[in-house]
Image: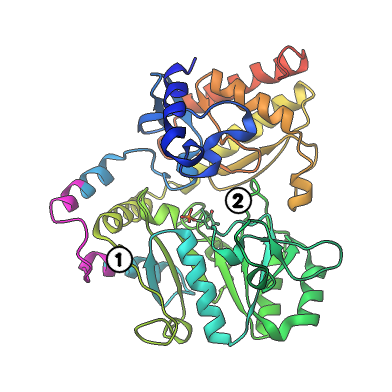
């Protein structure tokens, strides 16, 4: 079915490590070779095998307006004529920064970088510089990019200090990252009692979307805000996925909680490499050249990505598609859940705005250990059944899926019908790989 992709993957492996430029693209957990994409438009991907897919991956988040949105294409084309990068200041980067500052109450000053990873690394450095403390608290299952200090997991047993989850991350760095389960109030309280005076910052996805979607329990984010105030630690909201996903703003806008630092990426670049960290003037003024915390970037705020970002934000603001996106997502999610029930498939879901994950387990996961209870074999069957029918879900149980404004009612209907066929096959056990 995917002969051309297969051929290209063999070729890719000769020149690119693992044949991919980011690990999840290798499709390891679904047991097939990756599909090579030739082009994309609106809600659809087209593979090198000339097959069409309804795309729910959305490049893992940026494409809220669908692929190759005409307005963005035209803005970027116009920008290209003016040069791609100058290593100098531009009016456009001011325009984009102004939009973000006017939208996020917690952000007075911004700094643009090229990836979420870079923004996280810089924000944590800044938090350490500001507080003169060394430790950082993160939550299991939250992903904050691949900066050394974030490739850290819990040590064995009662150990509090983190251990590396990647070779090449040294223990001396990992031990400065403390780890708690997401939504575990008591564990956070305990860590603050023991180490509060050493904690520079708590970093959290205000809705977790990198272990699949996991929602914060009621009060959890406010609790993090309160305890970080109490101990003079900074609170960092990593809104790389959630920023501009559920409303024009972030989860902080919806929940009315002001973190000290905010990280944005994905949607704000409109599909181009652009991310940001920002916060109030007191803290941000420590960043170079204003202050002693160094951070720089050759392509930071480059005019092409910035134009794509401005075009994206302006369309989101002017068309306000959020209610419709949410409605469409709820139709897809709730009808699929109903079908799972009909065919006795253990399924739960977590969703917000236009972002959702189906978990093949009875109970809605609230943290990483609960996510891990999902039946990966059922997930794999679901994924492969969808691919066979021209529907492209994230190739891992532990990822979020996204709707865009380009997805039509018909696309959603096709997806629901495919889910029914797959669930029926699974019930009849005709399709267990
Ligand atoms: C994607 C993501 C990152 C990393 O961003 P990159 O641009 O891939 O480096 C960081 N945090 C969250 C919450 C993300 O979803």
Q: Which circle marks residue 209 in the picture?
A: 2
Q: Quadrant of residue 336?
A: top right
For residue 212, side relative to residue 292 (left or right)? right
Q: Reply yes or no: does residue 79 show up in magenta.
A: yes
Q: Residue furthest front?
A: 14
Q: Residues within 10 Å of mark 2 (few under 14, many from 20)?
A: many
Q: Which circle marks residue 298 in the picture?
A: 1
Q: Is mark 2 within 8 Å of ligand 1?
A: yes
Q: Reply yes or no: does residue 217 show up in magenta.
A: no
Residue drawn where x is 46% and y is 25% of the image? 53
For residue 74, side relative to residue 182 (left or right)? left
Q: Quadrant of residue 360?
A: top right
Q: Is residue 34 above or below residue 353?
A: above
Q: Which circle marks residue 266 in the picture?
A: none
User: Regarding mark 1 in the picture, which secondary structure is present there?
Assistant: loop
Q: Is mark 1 within 8 Å of ligand 1?
A: no
Residue drawn where x is 19% and y is 64% of the image? 86
Q: Quadrant of residue 174?
A: bottom right
Q: Is residue 33 visible?
A: yes
* Eye-nearest disc, 1 or 2: 1
Q: How far apart are the two marked residues, 1 and 2, measured between alpha carbons?
A: 30 Å
Specify the color scheme.
rainbow
Q: Which residues are magenta?
A: 77-94
Residue 330 image offset from top left, x and y in percent:
59, 38
The tag earlier along the polypeptide, 1 or 2, is: 2
Where, quadrant-wise, is the C terminus in this rendering? Answer: top right
User: Regarding mark 2 in the picture, which secondary structure is present there?
Assistant: loop
Question: Depth check: 151 or 378 in front?
Answer: 151
Q: Is residue 107 above or below residue 422?
A: below
């Amino acid at each position: 079915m995917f002969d051309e992709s297969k051929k290209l993957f063999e070729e890719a492996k000769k020149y690119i490590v693992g044949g991919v430029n980011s690990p999840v693209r290798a499709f390891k957990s679904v047991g097939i070779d990756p599909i090579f994409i030739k082009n994309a438009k609106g809600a659809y991907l087209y593979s090198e095998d000339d097959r069409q897919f309804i795309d729910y991956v959305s490049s893992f988040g940026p494409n809220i307006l669908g692929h190759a949105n005409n307005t963005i294409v035209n803005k970027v084309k116009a920008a290209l004529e003016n040069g791609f990068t100058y290593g100098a200041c531009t009016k456009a980067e001011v325009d984009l920064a102004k939009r973000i500052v006017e939208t996020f109450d917690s952000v007075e000053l911004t700094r643009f970088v090229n990836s979420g990873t870079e923004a996280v690394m810089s924000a944590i450095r800044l938090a350490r510089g500001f507080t003169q403390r060394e430790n950082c608290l993160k939550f299991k299952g939250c992903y904050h990019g691949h900066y050394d200090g974030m490739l850290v997991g819990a040590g064995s047993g009662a150990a509090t200090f983190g251990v590396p989850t990647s070779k090449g991350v040294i223990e001396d760095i990992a031990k400065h990252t403390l780890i708690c389960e997401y939504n575990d109030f008591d564990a956070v309280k305990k860590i603050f009692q023991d180490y509060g005076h050493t904690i520079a910052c708590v970093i959290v996805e205000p809705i977790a979307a990198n272990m699949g979607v996991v929602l914060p329990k009621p009060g959890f984010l406010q609790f993090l805000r309160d305890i970080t105030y109490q101990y003079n630690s900074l609170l960092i909201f990593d809104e790389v996925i959630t920023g501009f996903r559920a409303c024009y703003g972030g989860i902080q806008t919806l929940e009315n909680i002001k973190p000290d630092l905010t990280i944005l990426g994905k949607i704000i670049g409109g599909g181009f490499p652009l991310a940001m960290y920002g916060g109030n003037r007191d803290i941000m003024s420590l960043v170079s050249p204003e202050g002693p915390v160094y951070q720089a970037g050759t392509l930071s705020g480059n005019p092409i990505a910035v134009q794509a970002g401005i075009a994206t934000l302006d369309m989101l603001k002017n068309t306000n598609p959020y209610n419709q996106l949410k409605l469409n997502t709820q139709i897809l999610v709730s009808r699929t859940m109903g079908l799972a029930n009909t065919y006795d498939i253990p399924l739960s879901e977590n969703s917000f705005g236009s972002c959702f994950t189906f978990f093949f387990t009875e109970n809605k996961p609230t943290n990483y250990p609960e996510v891990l209870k999902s039946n990966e074999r059922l997930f794999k069957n679901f994924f492969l059944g969808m691919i066979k029918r021209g529907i492209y879900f994230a190739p891992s149980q532990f990822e979020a899926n996204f709707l865009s404004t380009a997805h039509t009612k018909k696309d959603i209907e096709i997806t629901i019908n495919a889910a029914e066929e797959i669930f029926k096959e699974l019930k009849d056990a005709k399709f267990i790989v």
